[in-house]
Image (cartoon, rainbow, N blue to C red):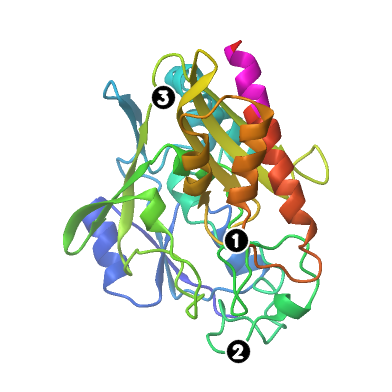
């Protein structure tokens, strides 16, 4: 294996030019995913790694209604931000549940959004059938061991799971991703940033080659809202979610007046449960409403042997999360 060339970018424009002008170039920030895939799993073979760690993409500012988070802010820095703790605590919960302290001190927020699939078949280059790694080759996970795979947004072409914890509450909040490339700047809602695998599993986001995430805009919850993130996993220590739910509720006189709900551990992308939100909006904040919403959220799963259990587990995760928030409103 030939080691990639290492280049340090001097500014944002320099970084974009260095990657855009070279088809084999990748950005390098915290490196907690990129270096694994390049040096350990040897799934990626970039010819050039462009170090962006010294670019002015750090810092967290509050505009009053939203947090502006630089793409190079670390997970640990965002989790410790006082506004996050006070106004969007389920973001902090997801950050703390998502990685060990050592990783949180290295991993960046922009990198977290772009982490690659944790599918064992994608990360094993000796497995020939992986549409995400080799388009048109098939999906070994459909017929193989698939306990940690997706049941929403999946198909016979790909059932790889989007494993980010942080992206679940960010999806519930309608976070926005600010992007810069050779063609200028643009902003994309996180709910539109990821691409369902369909028959092109190798395409994961709307990013064009060379485009760089610069800022993540995180809307703040209104005063009085309650939020929570529940992660169900095989062990309490650092582990990926079997299922998870991020929810925010506003309740008045026992009625849900505002709700946000997103799911993790079950989708090929961070999964916004909009149909479940529609069931909950204006409904009594009780177990009957919560169960009805859970049924709708998991109405059309794509399961294979080994993932069927996730359907009921995800429903129970939703109900438990909503019950906890309703109790906090009392």
Is residue 1 within the magenta segment?
no
Is residue 37 depicted above or below 199 in this figure?
A: above
- Residue beneath disc 2: 137
Q: Earlier in the sequence, mark 3 or mark 1?
A: 1
Report the Cα–Cα distance between label 3 and label 1: 27 Å
Which quadrant is home to the N terminus?
A: bottom right
Secondary structure of the residue carrying tag 1 is loop
State the residue in front, 217 or 292. 292
How many residues crowd mark 3 within 10 Å: few (<14), some (14–19), many (20+)? many
Residue 114 location (% of width, % of height): 47, 56
Task: Tell me where the magenta segment starts and ends, as one range.
Answer: 323-329
**Contact (Cβ within 8 Å) of mark 3 with mark 2:** no
- Residue beneath disc 1: 152
Residue 43 location (% of width, % of height): 60, 74
Report the Cα–Cα distance between label 3 and label 2: 44 Å
Residue 230 occupies quadrant: top right
For this orientation, the residue located farthest to the top is 330
Q: Earlier in the sequence, mark 3 or mark 2?
A: 2
């Amino acid at each position: 294996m030939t080691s990639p060339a290492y280049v340090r970018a001097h500014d944002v424009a320099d970084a974009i030019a260095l990657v855009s002008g070279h088809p084999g170039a990748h950005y390098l920030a915290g490196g907690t995913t990129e270096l694994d895939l390049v040096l350990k799993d040897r799934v990626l073979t970039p010819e050039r790694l462009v170090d962006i760690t010294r670019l002015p993409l750090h810092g967290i500012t509050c505009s009053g209604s939203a947090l502006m988070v630089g793409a190079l802010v670390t997970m640990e820095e965002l989790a410790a931000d006082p506004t996050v703790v006070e106004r969007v605590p389920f973001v902090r919960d997801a950050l703390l549940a998502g990685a060990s302290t050592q990783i949180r001190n290295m991993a960046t927020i922009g990198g977290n959004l772009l982490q690659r699939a944790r599918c064992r078949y994608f990360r094993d280059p000796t497995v020939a059938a992986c549409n995400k790694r080799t388009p048109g080759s098939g999906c070994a996970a459909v017929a193989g061991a698939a306990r940690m795979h997706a049941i929403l947004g999946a198909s016979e072409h790909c059932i790889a799971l989007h494993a980010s914890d942080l992206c679940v509450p960010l999806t519930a909040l309608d976070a926005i991703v600010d992007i810069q490339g050779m063609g200028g700047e643009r902003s994309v809602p996180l709910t539109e940033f990821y691409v369902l695998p369909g028959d092109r599993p190798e395409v994961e986001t709307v990013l064009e080659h060379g485009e760089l995430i610069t800022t993540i805009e995180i809307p703040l919850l209104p005063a009085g809202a309650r939020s929570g993130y529940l992660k169900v996993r095989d062990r309490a220590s650092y582990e990926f979610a079997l299922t998870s739910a991020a929810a925010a509720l506003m309740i008045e006189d026992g009625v849900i007046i505002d709700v946000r709900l997103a799911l993790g551990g079950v989708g090929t992308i961070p999964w916004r449960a909009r149909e479940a939100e529609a069931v909950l909006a204006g409904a009594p904040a009780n177990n009957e409403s919560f169960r009805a919403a859970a049924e709708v959220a998991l109405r059309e799963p794509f399961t294979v042997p080994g993932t069927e259990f996730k359907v009921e587990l995800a429903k129970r995760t939703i109900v438990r999360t909503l019950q906890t928030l309703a109790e906090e409103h009392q």
